[in-house]
Amino acid sequence: MASPEQDDKDLGPVLDKDGVRLTVDDAIATVTLTNPAKRNAQSPALWRALAEAGRLLPGSVRVVVLRAEGKSFSAGLDRQAFTPEGFDGEPSFIDLAHSSDAVLDEAIAGYQAGFTWWRRSDIVSIAAVQGHAIGAGFQLALACDLRVVADDVQFAMRETSLGLVPDLTGTHPLVGLVGYARALEICATGRFVAAEEAVSTGLANIAVPADQVDDTVRELATALLAAPRDAVIETKALLQGVQGRAYDDQRAAERAAQARRLRDLAGVGE
């Protein structure tokens, strides 16, 4: 199986636009942020490209790797968004602030679409994160199921210091991973979270030297592909539902999932 870096070099891209490249190698897809000159700063066009990448995933894909070119995973929102001019062809954030509630809500929901598909039940997503992952970059890493980080990683949620809130779906996974009190402290102070703390608090699954990130991600992807797909899908759905279910409801969900697996393995109903 090709490494994420080899994917980008050897495979024709399914999508390559607005700082996002999607390549597919059988059961593994790789989404790469491709603007290292700007530390992979994000924009509405990039968010739309991320959403399009999710729509273009073939049904054969089981694992999606998210990675970024350059020394930084993503420095967050491109500061051009805060200028009166904004981005070419886009309403500026100032324009949006003067729009109706419905228009503003629709715009933010559209931005969020690039962050929502990574936790689909039929795939497992892995973020390979190096250097800075700030604001929208932090939230994009949080959008994935798993995170492999380089030992130089620096997570930070800077929205509050700008007078904003994290609104790109990052608050739910952050609280789920580290708990309310630590999540509040991270967001309200905007401080950096380094690799050791990221692993110890559950933000990251593993931290390795930067030159070992790709190999580690490849090994993790291989391990994920070793289990039967339907068993992984059912297990992921069970775990995702824990926070919204009472203990007895979770027990019932386990029984129902296992019944489906047993019948499938026995060929019942075929």
Image: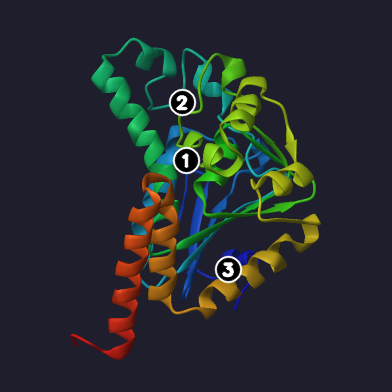
Residue 246 spot, x, y in % from top left = 37, 48
- Point out residue 89 in the picture as x, y percentages from the top left corner: 38, 27
Q: Can you identify the residue that label 1 sits on? A: 46
Above or below residue 252? Residue 204 is above
Q: Earlier in the sequence, mark 1 or mark 3?
A: 3
Dot 1 amino acid type: Leu
Residue at (46% x, 16% y) in the render: 85
Query: Residue 62 sits in which quadrant?
Result: bottom left
Earlier-in-chain disc, 1 versus 2: 1
Task: Compute the Cα span from label 1 to label 2.
Answer: 12 Å
The crowd level at tag 1 (other Cα within 10 Å; few <14, some 14-19, many 20+) is some
Mark 1 and 2 residues: CB-CB less than 8 Å, in contact?
no
**Which one is earlier in the sequence, the residue at label 3 or at label 2?**
3
Q: Work out which residue is located at the far front of the displayed protein and give it.
A: 248
Of residues 211 and 153, the one drawn nearer to the viewer in this rendering: 153
Vertical side of 6 occupied by 213: above or below: above
Q: CA distance from mark 1 to mark 3?
A: 20 Å
In the picture of the structure, the residue carrying the numbered disc 3 is: 7
- Mark toward the viewer: 3 or 2: 3
For mark 2, give the secondary structure.
Answer: loop
Please tell me which residue is depicted at 37% across the width and 13% down the height of the picture: 97
Residue 237 numbered mark, or none: none
- Asked whether residue 157 is in view, the answer is no
Residue, disc 2: 87
Mark 1: secondary structure: helix
**Residue drawn at 39 percent across, 60 percent down:** 237
